[in-house]
Image (cartoon, rainbow, N blue to C red):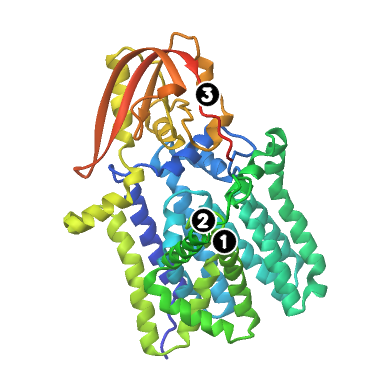
Amino acid sequence: MQKSPNYSLYFWLVSIGLVIAKVLFTLRPEIDLFTEEAQYWLWSQNMAWHYYSKPPLVAVLNYTSTAILGNTELGVRLNAILLGVGISWVTFLLGRHLYSSKVGFWSAMILQAMPMWWLASTFHMTDSSLTFFWALGLYFAYRGVADGKKSWWIWAGVATAFGLMAKVVMGLIFPFLLIYLLYTGTWKAQSKNYAVFFLISLLGFIPALVWNWQNNFDTFKHLATLGGGGGKSGAFDAAKATAGFFEYVGGQLAMISVFLLPLAAGAFRGTIKSNDHVKIYLFLPVLMSWTGFAFLSFMTSIEVNWPVFAYSSLAILMAAWVTEQSLTWRKIRNWGVGLSIGLPLLFILPDFTFLKSIKPIKKAEKSAFRRMAGYQPLADRLVSLRDSLGVEDAYVFSETYHMASELSFYLPDHPQTYMLNMGSRKNQFDLWPGLEQFVGQDKVGIFVSWNFDSPGEFADFQELLYEEELPVTFRGEPLRIAKIQVWRKLEEFNPYQPDSY
């Protein structure tokens, strides 16, 4: 008798291998934090109930991990790496519970082949914890629906509360479960359990409500602007709206992986033709997230990562569908998963094989990591300048929160840096003490920018002490040039006053 494959073991072997690969990527000396990661790390140095654009969970996780591992890239990124394993494991569990261990395994493999999973599990963004708690809430809620036990609904509420403290879009789980219960005719039997789940979930809104009550409800205004409201009125541009929609569609297909699109199409057709409640449960959140943001894409620009937190259940649908197909389809699955995992590994791992020395690959890698390179050398240069110019206590500022956050992380003393708003929309730096505190004081400020040659009319200093242009490279290739200026005594401070949230 042939022994059944140990799919749990296979899952952990692959997952541990990917963890090792991501740790090696994080330790690469030429790779710095992604600019959004640096921003969220800086939030953790300024702990609060909530932040301008996001709930507090990303900062809490960074605060905890860096307290253990120090303010290092690994101290930040380990959160994403572990959450990525958690997303995959919960997907495995749900696939196994609904179908079989084989389907559970391939669900996790297909998920780990999707670019959306690579982003969430490599770079510590709000999507990392959101996607994990979404998958966990989906798993607990299904157990509650199927078993009718209140305990599962309670756990679903806890997962949802944490998800809401990661990103408010977690609230999509409320209409999804309500629609599903009504569709399956189980609302009457489950209404009390749903109410318990809903009330527990609402605990996740408390940090946002407390902070926004104290801060003029800025987050709600920010979300309204992102949703296409609160901006400047104007005539509807049909051509621009249509282009935005097709850009959105292309981005979402890419987040699934072009190599896996045949499986996604097959699973979609199989679900549409079916009245299977399990398939509907897996497909409905994907459909709701995708269509909701598709509608918004006609009115505003949609970031490619926004809808993908709900795609983990799509991986289960694809795995279940292809498992029942012919050998040819299973080969397409194997190749699709292999290529979709292998290509990211080629980019993130050090150049063990020297393949990345091939000019087109080297160029693509440089372009991919442009926003996470050059900050450590820039910080090292600022340390040298502060020492040589005798201005060790100089404050550092830039016109973007990206640069300001990166320099705060990479400067050895991790100082609070500042942002001089020269035309951007409102952000967290606008709520913190800024350069206004230095007006009239005989202090030195260091301006650093990729984009501007000086603070211009927004900040008038008494004297320019020093300036230079610092070219930075990526693996020996020119990347971009930073402007550095050392100024003494801020006399007038006239930042741009954003009217957009």
- In this view of the protein, which residue sits in the foreground, 105 or 116? 116
The picture places residue 357, in percent across and down from the top left corner, at 17, 54
Q: Nearer the viewer, mark 3 or mark 2?
A: 2
The reply to whether dot 1 and dot 2 touch (C-beta < 8 Å) is: yes
Q: Secondary structure at mark 2?
A: loop
Question: Dot 1: what SS?
Answer: helix
Q: Quickly name the residue at label 3.
A: 434
Q: Earlier in the sequence, mark 3 or mark 2?
A: 2
Q: Which residue is mark 2?
A: 302
Q: Quadrant of the N terminus?
A: bottom left
Q: Which residue is under mark 1?
A: 293
- Identify the disc placed on residue 179: none
How far apart marks 3 and 2 lie (CA) works out to: 30 Å
- Is 291 above or below relative to 122? below
**Would you place residue 240 above or below residue 491 in this image?**
below
Element under label 3? loop
Quarter-of-image position of residue 486: top left
